[in-house]
Image: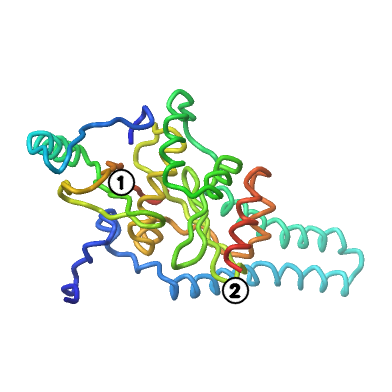
Amino acid sequence: MDGTGHTTLAEWSVEDDAAFEAAVREFAGQQELGYIGTVPDGPGKATHVRALPRDADMVILRRPIAGG
Amino acid sequence: MPAVSGQAPASALPELASVPWRTPTDAAWLRRWGRVWHAWTLLYTVPFLAAAAGMVWLDPLATPVALAALAHAWIIPELYAFRGASTVRPKGPRNEAAEAVAQGLLGDFLGHEERELQRDTGLALERGGLGIWLVGEGGALLVTPGGRRVHCFCVGTTEAELPPSDRIAHLLLALRQDEVGFATVANHAFAGAPWRVRRRLPTAMRPALDAARSAAG
């Protein structure tokens, strides 16, 4: 999620190793920028991921939150 | 396997590392602070009421001063409630060009009724273990089970330029990941009766608090 609403950074499939490797590099680059990987797990649940899960339908990169 | 003492569980919100001194804001913490806020409200209201009554009883000529004391007894709780309601008021840049895209993504995270409520009121209703949450752009309200008390939290993303719906989506994802962690990272601003917060909310947001109270009751 970013200032444009959201941007698709990478797409991959379980079978496509090259696409997954590219997605892993992109994911790592975003983590270095401070983004946090989160996988929505259906109603009311989400999981923080430190490494890109190959079988996830969608991984959302969000900024940290803080008390205002 | 139990977590090693001193280490956060794998599901813990990463942002907790920035507030290591805070006690987890769990149900017991919320009950305790709810009572503290209740006692605090009595402490700064009752003396003014007693002083007003005492002055009129001692000398009716002191009525204007007694009225001033009554005004204090009314204004101070109102200011605290206003502070609580302000946590979810719309704030920051609107970023209207990107808001439609962000609204679409946020809508994907919500059920049908919650999506409609969010579009009408600006607050996303989320059922949690601690109660019913209403998540706004820069804060959240928590209606505790039974619907008799609301806790107000000030919390937001560290990137203020995001469109409003993205800011809500950030908070919603963090809340879904670790509810107690979310409440711990947030700054607790107020606790009190829902009617006190409701009257200080923007009119458009009030149906969301009504829905949360209904869901919590």
User: For residue B118, which quarter of the picture?
Assistant: top right
Label 2 near label 1: C-beta < 8 Å? Answer: no
Out of B116 and A51, give the one closest to the viewer.
B116
Out of B84 and B195, give the one closest to the viewer.
B195
Out of B158 and B22, give the one closest to the viewer.
B158
- Which residue type carries mark 1? Pro
Image quarter where the N terminus of chain B lies is bottom left
- What kind of element bears circle 2? helix
The image's colour scheme reads rainbow
Q: Name the residue under label 2.
A: B39
- What kind of element bears circle 1? loop
x, y percentage for residue B45?
69, 67
Report the number of discs. 2
Q: Name the residue under label 1.
A: A64
Image quarter where the C terminus of chain B lies is bottom right
Q: In this view, does A67 lie to the left or right of A26?
A: right
- Which residue type carries mark 2? Ala
x, y percentage for residue B35?
55, 74
Which residue: 16% across, 46% down?
A52
Chain ID of residue with mark 1:
A
Q: How crowded is mark 2: few (under 14 residues within 10 Å), some or many (20 or more)?
A: few
Which residue: 36% across, 29% down?
A3
Image: B6 above or below A41: below
Give the CA separation, mark 1 to mark 2: 34 Å
Q: Is residue B70 left or right of residue B57?
A: left
x, y percentage for residue B211?
62, 56
Chain ID of residue with mark 2:
B
Which residue: 88% across, 74% down?
B57
